[in-house]
Image: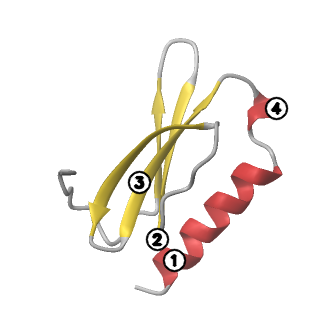
Amino acid sequence: MMKLYRVSKYHFGAVSVRPDHLHLGFISDREIGHERIIRTKRVGPSRVGHSVKLSSPEDMNSQLMEWLSRAYRLHARQ
């Protein structure tokens, strides 16, 4: 069974700084099955948190921007 985590209604994503990369987290209304997703976590009854590792500027591509855009739109519906 997955543990549920509470997420603030004011956040749709977050960035964690690591010595050699960034972790970018964002929220979705469903689990995204993609090789770039390094971690998923159920954060509510209809929300799933996802983490992506960013090692270079090229990692911030159109696919990731679409996921972030969806996370923002999902947040706006709350």
Residue assigned mark 2: 29
Element type where label 4 sits in the image: helix
The numbered mark, 3 or 2, whose residue comes first in the sequence reads 2
Element type where label 1 sits in the image: helix
Residue assigned mark 1: 74
Q: Residue at x 46, y 63 (%)?
A: 12
Looking at the picture, how far across and down is residue 37, in whole percent?
56, 40
Against 34, is 17 above or below?
Answer: above
Q: Residue at x 48, y 66 (%)?
A: 30
Against 13, is 19 above or below?
Answer: above
Looking at the picture, how far across and down is residue 39, in whole percent?
44, 38
Q: Could you say which quadrant of the image residue 78 lies in?
A: bottom left
The numbered mark, 2 or 1, whose residue comes first in the sequence reads 2
Look at the numbered discs 3 and 2 and tell me whether their residues touch, using CB distance below 8 Å: no
The numbered mark, 1 or 3, whose residue comes first in the sequence reads 3
Q: Could you say which quadrant of the image residue 5 lies in?
A: bottom left
Against 74, is 31 above or below?
Answer: above
Residue assigned mark 4: 58
In the figure, is residue 63 to the left or right of 6?
Answer: right
Looking at the picture, how far across and down is residue 38, in whole percent?
51, 34
